[in-house]
Image: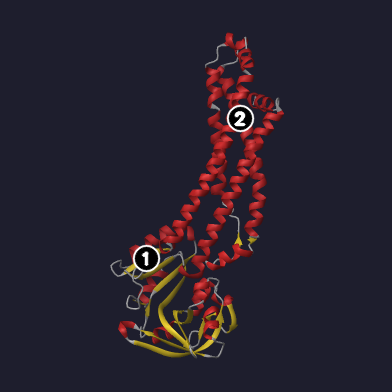
Amino acid sequence: MSDLRLAWRNIWRNKRRTLLTAASIFLAVFLALIVRSLQTGLFDNLIQISIQSYTGHIQIHKKGYWDDRTIDNTIVYNDSLTAVVNRLKNVEITVPRLEYFALASSGMQTKGVIIIGTDPVKEDSLTRLSSKMVKGLYLDRTGRGVIVAGGLAEFLGLHTGDTLILIGQGFHGVSAAGKFSVRGIIHLPSPPLDNQVVYMNLPTAQDFFSADNRISSLSISLKKPDDIGMTMGELTSAVNLSKFEVMSWDQLMVEIMQQLKVKTASGMIIISILYLIVGFGIFGTVIMMTNERTKEFGVMVSVGMQKSRLAMILVLEMVFIGLTGALSGLAAALPIMAWYNFHPIKLWGAMAQAYLSYGIEPLLPLALKWGFILSNFTAVMVIVLLTCIFPVRRVFKLKVVEALHK
């Protein structure tokens, strides 16, 4: 305890130097936490939107379907498949979908569209599709009415109650054609999807494509997303991998994951440069402090203080300065991160339009995860400890007679 008190008193003998060093550490920790929080919040939001709006955490489909997404590469949707999936404790929702392309027509206008046949109740549980309705009614499980994306409805001049004609190719080359009543109009945040998607319930889609009891994929939402690795292992051992393919969300969104890795790497480079600059600043302070106190060290050793104890006091001094700066930076950053985690920043203008073009709500939440908070705090303290090598080495190599004549 005496060493701790002595170290604490020593750092305040030169208040200006101590405060400047602590301030540089404070600024580094504060900026690093805010940058990492922004970056992590943006990425987590993008991934969560992608999972909730379409893919789910895991998808099961026919082996080879992801490379050749045709109506012929569909699987039979039966009780045996659902029993295997629902047996797993971590599975919350399973959403069967049948997807394929068709030509949509209304009046003199025609356009290629994506038809998504789904279970309305399960789909809404996963993607909250009903909350995106702007006109009319949401899908039901029995009727033949469809809901049309807003951009597509505008292009075709459709309103609720109008008739939509669909022509395409069904299972094994069977002709697919039908007239459907527009039950409602939906707004999707992604312009590409908003301009070409038609939703119908699963039985209607199966009847239209002559694909009885068949689905393109089974999307799975998990209760505990962090346990996706364990659930993937259970699924791969439970299903016939010669017929089915089990893919996690990061395998389904390879392009997005690659972009996130690049952005994460660039962010880490910026933070590393920031810490490098701060490290040199701390090291400069240590050199000045050591050189100024060489005579003091000589006196202390000459009156009987062990060099090991003196070195430990110097390390404690630097640890106190590091903790003062790091904890104050953490204390300043945490309220900001917490506030904008629960109240995301609303974007506007060109940036908001850019987000909307990718189907992302123009919000910028800050992440609040102890993982990167502790990693940044640890990084600063490691830098501080590394700078202690110089004064410790000088103390153990100290020649008392020379030091007293400084």
Marks 2/1: CA–CA distance: 52 Å
Q: Quadrant of the N terminus?
A: top right
Q: Position of residue 366 (x, y in %)?
A: 60, 55
| Callout 1 crowding tier (Cα within 10 Å): few <14, some 14–19, many ≥20 | many
Element under disc 2:
helix
* Left or right placement of residue 95 versus residue 64 in this view: right
- Residue for badge 2: 318
- Residue 298 is labelled as none
Query: Is 336 in front, or is 31?
Result: 31
The answer to whether 178 is drawn above or below residue 281 in the figure is below
Q: Position of residue 33 (x, y in %)?
A: 59, 47
Q: In this rendering, does residue 254 appear at all?
A: yes
- Residue for badge 1: 246
Query: Is 348 in front, or is 58?
Result: 348
Query: Which badge, 2 or 1, comes first in the chain's sequence?
Result: 1
| Callout 2 crowding tier (Cα within 10 Å): few <14, some 14–19, many ≥20 | many
Q: Position of residue 266 (x, y in %)?
A: 50, 49
Indicate the amino acid at tag 2.
Met
* Left or right placement of residue 220 versus residue 240 in this view: right
